[in-house]
Amino acid sequence: MNCKDAIPWMHEYLDGDLSGPEAAKLKEHLLTCRDCRAMFEQFERTEALVRSLTPVPVPGDLTARIMNGIPMPKRRGAWLRWVRRHPAASVAAVFALVMLTSFATMWNEDSELIVKGTDLEHVQIRGNTVIVPAGQTVRGNLMVQGGEVQVEGEVSGNLTVIDGTVNMASTARIAGQYKKVDQALDYVWYKLNDWATAITH
């Protein structure tokens, strides 16, 4: 046995926790090692001194006072637990919130005239007015934002007007759906649908 292993065994021996064979090995080592024997005697004196001390009476409410003095742990909110359990959904929710905020901000800005479509050859633009002339057909969808739309001819797809007005002549014909977006929430929903359609195609 070396001295490094003997020290923890000394403590166990003094506590009465060392078994017979290990106690015999420790005693054999103490007979041959003067330094460990001196250390063991010092441990015995310290132990005897501690046992001779008169115990200090402990007030009956000490435990309660200590427990009351410990600060209560802060409770985590239910939303924080949900975020930790569903990280992917949390990221998606934050992304959707950022997108909604940016779309709502875009709605509040003064926008210039924007015209989009697959076939704009027959569309006329005069100032802030987009005209589909009589006898002309716009093939596919037509989207106009921030202006006035005057339909005298035909739109073979959908017509979407964002933050603008529509005038339809008696000769006007829209083969698809006509949608007018004039509220911020409708605009956000339209942009999300448009964005989702762009991703899937």
Image (cartoon, helix red, strand yellow):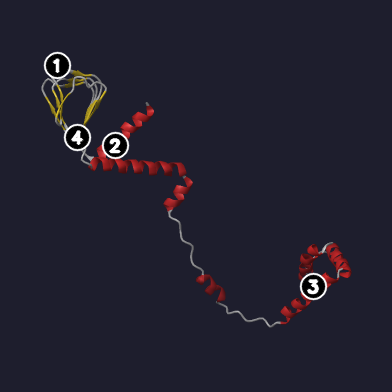
- Crowd class of label 1 (few under 14; some 14 to 19; many from 20; radius 10 Å): few
Q: Provide residue 75's location: percent of width, then percent of height.
A: 46, 59
- Name the side, left or right, on which 107 lies relative to 64: left
Residue 36 is left or right of residue 60, and the answer is right
Mark 1 sits on what residue? 135
Q: Secondary structure at mark 4?
A: loop
Q: CA distance from mark 3 to mark 1?
A: 112 Å
Secondary structure at badge 3 equals helix
Which residue is farthest top? Answer: 135
Q: Which mark is residue 170?
A: none
Comes first in the chain, label 3 or label 4 = 3
The disc, 2 or 1, on the residue closer to the chain's N-terminal end is: 1
Q: Is residue 53 left or right of residue 84?
A: right
Q: Which residue is mark 2?
A: 189
Mark 3 and mark 1 lie on one chain; the one further toward the N terminus is: 3
Q: Which residue in the protein does label 3 denote?
A: 39
Q: Amino acid at mark 1?
A: Gly
How far across and how far down the image is residue 87, in percent? Answer: 46, 44
Task: Identify the image quadrant of the N terminus.
Answer: bottom right
Q: Earlier in the sequence, mark 4 or mark 2?
A: 4
Tell which tag, 2 or 1, sits nearer the viewer.
1
Q: Nearer the viewer, mark 1 or mark 4?
A: 4
Q: Which residue is mark 4?
A: 146
Mark 3 → mark 2, Cα distance in angstroms:
81 Å
**For the view shown, which residue lies furthest in the front direction?**
127
